Structure formats: structure tokens, C-alpha cells
Image: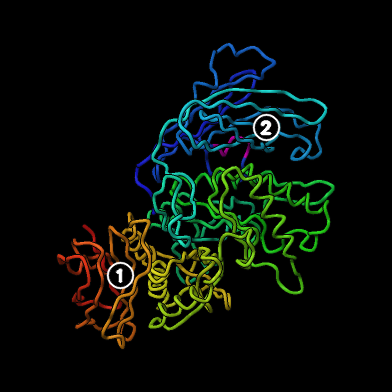
């Protein structure tokens, strides 16, 4: 869910130089330059306050700057982004990404040291990023080197407390659910989308949005910029975005090869702005590292090829790891006749975990939950089932993917077959979404909202317009704040010929969801359910289509029968103190 003003997250861009330097507020541009994309002080899903924290540091070989500004003057919120900028001439390098190395060690107030790498950012500029997890005074030391010459730097900064809850982690009480570093529950529902520029324009100005049937005036559908897009979807409660690098999205590398990896500089900057914008709007990032065609799929026995792959993985972690919450190795790969040996996955995922200081969970697609190095079951599912069967079809998909050491299930792509939109599409999405939540699975919808007439065969994606977003808003308002201990329980429905139902229970809350699977037109009456409530409190019945309260009642704890108010299509129950 898009967050209210509940934290102040300051991102410090520290310029490590001999003289003062500054950057401008980020702007959407066609071709990004060195300082077009920088981070600013961020607050929830709201517009950040103007400006950002900037200071000038000096190398250990030089005197302090005349203006007297020192790195220790900077303050960043816990789990914020602390960014260092290193000026270093790049004119003499044919491959600045790999001919210059930046290494930084951050030392926490507790004494814990974390080593990270930097990356080539733009001509004559290298950056390093870090997300600190302790409050108090931090120290850092850095070195930039090309093997023949080097310079050392050091500094300090202060981390203050913030309301940002940290990274996403596996729920220790329920491995199919998620929590944040601070222990608060995280109930994700996500989107993915194409991120491609048109006619040389920015890919971040080309998101499909609230289109209709295409016509001569809009042959490519309706488009908007990232700010409008994320304001709408973040405001509706979508809180996860799958960035499918090199799969209907811009790639990050030109070459991955033992002779040297070459990365894409403008695309790297677009990636910076993407993850920063997602964070600003309260959406977590689910990042695919490789696309449809991971390099050297048969190279697990070739040390030089695997080393080139690992260098790219390290670049991705160094550049984006402080913003990402989930990694995915590849997208919908391999496909015949290509095969990928188990050892390829093991080597790459093991290395990824070694160099990632934040230890984000790892997925891959096609899913490989049988591998111990893969943390997530990640199927893709597209269908156009009869709406009467949407909850059942969703549950069957979830059950078919269970059984691997209780690994969490995230459907990395979900949508319609045949066409992205039809008259029943929004209802199917609503029924799938509620059923997935009650059956401990996460959906990431592949969003195609430029128009309503996109046909992609088996995988035609899904239109997520105002109606669909309003449905998600109701769901996310309903689940917000639910106890992290919720787990599936049984409910009894005497009239199972008309209604199917699902329930979750925790010491502080009981919730249920019912679907009248034979009639979506007329009101459903005369339904009762028998439950075992863990608490006494107020039972509130909600219409999932509108969020309207259909009825309330006082209930006791223990086994009891409740009368369901009149409803059409589906209804949700929450019992809380």
C-alpha cells in the first residue's frame, strides 16, 4: 500500500572531492546526464521536500576544503540511502566500468563492518551506495584505483531513527508470508510493465495508462510519465514492482564477456531513477537481473565465462542493491533447445548472496524451487476462466505450486489470456486477488493499460484501470495492519452449493472471504458460516467491490455461527477488538 507521511528518509549524496560540488533536483529527461538523476530527501509516497543533503569531503591525501563542510555533518534516516560520489578522470579508459575499482567499508556504531563496491556512474564520476541499518555515528573508508594509481578517502555520517521499516524478509512465523526488518507485516500485491522508450524518448515517460480501444489518434495507446503512473498505482495500494530487465524493458549491459563487460550508461541512470521513484511512492522493487537470455547458459564449467557473469551480478548489486527487496535471476528461461545446468543457478545465486550485503531473497523464472539456493516459488499464470471459477482456479494454481519446504509463492506474472481486457476482466482480477491473499500467495500483474485491445495469445497481460485500481485499494485497506501471525483456518459453510469461503486467524484478528460462485447478478441471501474466533470483538462485513460496510455485529470468542448479510458476488469479514 502506498504509505502516508510516516517517515523521513534522507538520501545523502556526498561528493568526495577537493572543492564543493552540488547537484540539481531530479528531472525526467530524454537523455539523462550525470546529475539528472539524483536522490533527494524522501517522505513516504509524498513529494519530497526540495533539495538534498550535499557536502564536500576530501581525500586522505588533501587538506580540508576552505568552506569547512565535512562528511560528519550529514544525517540520513535508518534504512535510507547514503551515497558517495568520487570524481576521477575517465578519459584514459576504454572500459571505465571494469578498469577502475571503488571499494568502500562502512563501520556501524556497533563495530560491524560492511564492504561494498562502487560503480562507474558517468564521465569522470563514480558512485557508491549504502543503506545503513543502525542508528548512531557511522564511519567509512574508501579507495578508488585503476591498478596503477589509487586514492584513499574517509568520512563519517550520522544515522537517525526513521519510520521506514527496512527491507522485506521472510516471516519467521510463517515462511509463506513476508515482514519488514522491523517485524511489521508486508502484504504485497504487485505490477510489472514494459519500460521502453519511443523514438529516442525516455522509457520513464512511456508507461501505458488508462487507455481505451486504440484508434487513429492513439495507435500506440495512451501513455504517461512515471510520476503520474506511480502516483496512481501506489495510491491504489500496489506496493511491489517487478522490473524485468531486458524483457520488454531496457537492458543494462552491452557485453558480458571474459574479455570485459561493458554496461550501458544512460540505461543505468534510468534504472537509478526507476528504483528511486518506486521507493518514493512506496513500491518495493523485485528486480530481474537477466532477461530471457542469460549469458553463457551452458558455461557453468567455464571459469572465465562464469567470472564475467559474476562481475555483472556484482555491478547490479553495487548499483541497485540498496533499493531492491527481491532478486530474480532471469525471466521465463530457459526455453528449448537451451538448457541451464543446476550448477549455473547454484554458482550465480551463491555468489549473489555472498556479495549482497542486504541478503535479499532470490527467485528465478522459470521457477526452480527444488534448488536450495532459490528462496521463492515464482510461477507465471495467464488465464481467462469463467468468473464463477476464478477463486477456484486461483486456489488450484497455488496448491499446484506448494510442496517445496514451505517456500513463499510469488506469481511473477499474472494476467489474462487472449486479450488484456474484457467485460469480466476486472471481476476476475478482484476474485483472484482476494483468493491469493487468503491462500498465502502474492500476485504481480503484468500491466498493459495503454489500451483495452492488446492481444498476446496465451499471455495477454491485464488492463489495470480506475476500476481495477479501486478494487485493489479496498483489498489493501482491508489487509493493512493485519497480525503477522495470520494463518489459514477452516470455516463451515452449510450452503456450499452456492458459496465458497476462505479464512485466516491470528490471536488479534479473524478474517474471512466468501464468493457466491453461481450468481454474480442477484443478491445472495440466507448464508451463514460457523467459525472459531480467537477473540471477542466487532465483526465487520465489507463489500470488496466498494469497501462499503454491509453490516456489523458484536461477537464472542470461540465457536459460533454468524449470519452473513445480503451481498452480491463476494463479501469479506473482519473480526477485531
The secondary structure that dominates the magenta segment is loop
Does residue 363 sit above or below 280 in this rendering? below
The residue under the point 76% across, 37% down is: 96
Residue 450 visible in the snapshot? no
The residue under the point 69% across, 37% down is: 120
Instruction: Tell me the colour scheme of the image.
Output: rainbow
Instruction: Decide which of tag 1 and tag 2 comes sooner along the chain.
Output: 2
Q: Quadrant of the N terminus?
A: bottom left
Which mark is drawn over residue 260?
none
> In terms of depth relative to the viewer, which is nearer, 106 or 531?
531
The residue under the point 78% across, 49% down is: 307
1 vs 2, front mark: 1
Residue tagged 1: 512
* Helix, strand or loop for disc 1: strand
Q: Position of residue 6 (x, y in %)?
A: 35, 42
- Asked if the stretch drawn in magenta spans residue 397, the answer is no
Does residue 493 sit above or below 304 in this rendering? below
Q: Position of residue 511 (x, y in %)?
A: 29, 66
Does residue 290 sit above or below 159 in this rendering? below
Instruction: Give the extent of the magenta segment.
Output: 33-38
- Asked if the stretch drawn in magenta spans residue 37, the answer is yes
Q: Is residue 392 left or right of residue 334?
A: left
Residue 336 visible in the snapshot? yes
Residue tagged 2: 125
Decide: marks 1, 2 in contact (CB < 8 A)? no
Q: Position of residue 14 (x, y in %)?
A: 57, 27
> In terms of depth relative to the viewer, which is nearer, 400 or 542?
400
**CA gap, disc 1 to disc 2?**
54 Å
Q: Quadrant of the C terminus?
A: bottom left
Amino acid at each position: 500500500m502506498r504509505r502516508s507521511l510516516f517517515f523521513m528518509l534522507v538520501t545523502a549524496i556526498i561528493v568526495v572531492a577537493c572543492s564543493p560540488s552540488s547537484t540539481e533536483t531530479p528531472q525526467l529527461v530524454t537523455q539523462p546526464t550525470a546529475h539528472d538523476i539524483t536522490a533527494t530527501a524522501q517522505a513516504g509516497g509524498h513529494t519530497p521536500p526540495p533539495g538534498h543533503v550535499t557536502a564536500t569531503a576530501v581525500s586522505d591525501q588533501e587538506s580540508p576544503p576552505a568552506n569547512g563542510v565535512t562528511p560528519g555533518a550529514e544525517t540520513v534516516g535508518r534504512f535510507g540511502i547514503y551515497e558517495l560520489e568520487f570524481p576521477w578522470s575517465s578519459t584514459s579508459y576504454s572500459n571505465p566500468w571494469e578498469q577502475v575499482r571503488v571499494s568502500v567499508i562502512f563501520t556501524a556504531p556497533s563495530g560491524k563492518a560492511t564492504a561494498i563496491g562502487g560503480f562507474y556512474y558517468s564521465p569522470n564520476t563514480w558512485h557508491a551506495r549504502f543503506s545503513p541499518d543502525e542508528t548512531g555515528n557511522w564511519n567509512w573508508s574508501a579507495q578508488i584505483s585503476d591498478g596503477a594509481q589509487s586514492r584513499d578517502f574517509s568520512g563519517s555520517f550520522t544515522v537517525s531513527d526513521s519510520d521506514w521499516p527496512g527491507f522485506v524478509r521472510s516471516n519467521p512465523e510463517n515462511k509463506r508470508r513476508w515482514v519488514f526488518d522491523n517485524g511489521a507485516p508486508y502484504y504485497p500485491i504487485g505490477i510489472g510493465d514494459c519500460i521502453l522508450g519511443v523514438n529516442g524518448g525516455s522509457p520513464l515517460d512511456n508507461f501505458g495508462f488508462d487507455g481505451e480501444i486504440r484508434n487513429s489518434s492513439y495507435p500506440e495507446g495512451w501513455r504517461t510519465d512515471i510520476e503520474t503512473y506511480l502516483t496512481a498505482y501506489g495510491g491504489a495500494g500496489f506496493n511491489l514492482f517487478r522490473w524485468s530487465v531486458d524483457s520488454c524493458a531496457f537492458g543494462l549491459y552491452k557485453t558480458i564477456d571474459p574479455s570485459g563487460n561493458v554496461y550501458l550508461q544512460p540505461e543505468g541512470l534510468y534504472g537509478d531513477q526507476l528504483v528511486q521513484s518506486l521507493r518514493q511512492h512506496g513500491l518495493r522493487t523485485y528486480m530481474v537481473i537477466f532477461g530471457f537470455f542469460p549469458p553463457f547458459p551452458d558455461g557453468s564449467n567455464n571459469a572465465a565465462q562464469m567470472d564475467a557473469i559474476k562481475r555483472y551480478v556484482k555491478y547490479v548489486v553495487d548499483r541497485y542493491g540498496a533499493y531492491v527487496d527481491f532478486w530474480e535471476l532471469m525471466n521465463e528461461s530457459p526455453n528449448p533447445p537451451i538448457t541451464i545446468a543446476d550448477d549455473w543457478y547454484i554458482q550465480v545465486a551463491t555468489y549473489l548472496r555472498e556479495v549482497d550485503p542486504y541478503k535479499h531473497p532470490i527467485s528465478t523464472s522459470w521457477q526452480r524451487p527444488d534448488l536450495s539456493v532459490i528462496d521463492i516459488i515464482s510461477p507465471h499464470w495467464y488465464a481467462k476462466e469463467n468468473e464463477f471459477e476464478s477463486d477456484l482456479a486461483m486456489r488450484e494454481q497455488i496448491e499446484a505450486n506448494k510442496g517445496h519446504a514451505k517456500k513463499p509463492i510469488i506469481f511473477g506474472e499474472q494476467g489474462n489470456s487472449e486479450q488484456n481486457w474484457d467485460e469480466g476482466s476486472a471481476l476476475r482480477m478482484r476474485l483472484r486477488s482476494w483468493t491469493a491473499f487468503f491462500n498465502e500467495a502474492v500476485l504481480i500483474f503484468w500491466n498493459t493499460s495503454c489500451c483495452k485491445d492488446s492481444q498476446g495469445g496465451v499471455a495477454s497481460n491485464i488492463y489495470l484501470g480506475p476500476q481495477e485500481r479501486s478494487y485493489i485499494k479496498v483489498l489493501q485497506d482491508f489487509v493493512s495492519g493485519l497480525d503477522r501471525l495470520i494463518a489459514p483456518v477452516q470455516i463451515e459453510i452449510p450452503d456450499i452449493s452456492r458459496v465458497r469461503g476462505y479464512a485466516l486467524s491470528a490471536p488479534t484478528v479473524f478474517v474471512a472471504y466468501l464468493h457466491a460462485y453461481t450468481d454474480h447478478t442477484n443478491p445472495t441471501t440466507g448464508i451463514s458460516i460457523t467459525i472459531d474466533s480467537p477473540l471477542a470483538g466487532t465483526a465487520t462485513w465489507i463489500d470488496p467491490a466498494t469497501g462499503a460496510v454491509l453490516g456489523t455485529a458484536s461477537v464472542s470468542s470461540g465457536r459460533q455461527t454468524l449470519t452473513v448479510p445480503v451481498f452480491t458476488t463476494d463479501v469479506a469479514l473482519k473480526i477485531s477488538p
